[in-house]
Structures are given as structure tokens and as C-alpha cells.
Amino acid sequence: MGRDLLMIRSVTPNPSSGFVSITYRAPTRGEVRLDIRHPGGELSTRLVEGPHEPGEYTACATGLAPGRYVCVLSAAAGSVSAGFEVMD
């Protein structure tokens, strides 16, 4: 995929046991936010909020309760999402 796209490259492992590593790409300089949300949209945790240079980054979340979640990556270029599940 192109270097000019805002993207969530991977969410691993999926399913997980409470720890996930999220690799994402910021295509341009600017503010980026990475949230983990419940499927209904309620915020579970905000992993990233702040300025980024163009490039690939990784953020990690730990201690997630069992259930389904959605990662939402937002920037001036728009937003993208990816789902994952945490098992017991």
C-alpha cells in the first residue's frame, strides 16, 4: 500500500489475551489520535494524541478486558478503523 495513506497496518495478536500492538502510518506531518473504542463507540482508552512526522509507528495497549474493540486512527487526512477481539 502507498506511503501517502493514513492506515492501520496491523493489530496483533488478534484475538489477544489483553495485550495488543497496533502499527499505523501517518502520511503527513500533523496531529494524530489513536483510540480504542467499544463497538458502540464508547472510548475505552486513548493510546496516542499529538503531533507526528510522516512515518510508521507502533503503540501498545495492555490490560484490556475480554470483548470486541475497534481501533480508530484519526488525522487531518481522515480516519480509519480496524477491529480486534480480546479473549479470556
Image: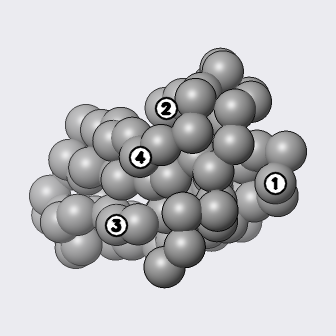
Q: Is residue 53 left or right of residue 10?
A: right
Tag 3's secondary structure? strand
* Image quadrant assignment for residue 13: bottom left
* Res. 27 mark: none
Task: Give the residue type at disc 1.
Answer: Ala
How many angstroms separate mark 2 from mark 4 (CA)?
A: 15 Å
- Classify residue 73 as left or right of residue 20: right
Q: Locate residue 86: give its quadrant.
A: bottom left
Asked whether the residues under the numbered discs 1 and 3 touch, taking CB atoms below 8 Å apart as contact, a structural biologist would say no
Q: Position of residue 80 (x, y in %)?
A: 67, 66
Residue beneath label 1, please? 77
Which is nearer the N-term, disc 4 or disc 1?
Answer: 4
Q: Position of residue 35 (x, y in %)?
A: 59, 43
Earlier sequence position, callout 3 versus callout 2: 3
Q: Amino acid at mark 3?
A: Ser
Q: Separation of disc 3 and disc 4 at Cα?
A: 11 Å
The image's mark for residue 47 is: 2
What amino acid does circle 2 point to?
Answer: Leu
Find disc 4 in the rendering and name its residue: 56
Above or below, 80 relative to 22: below
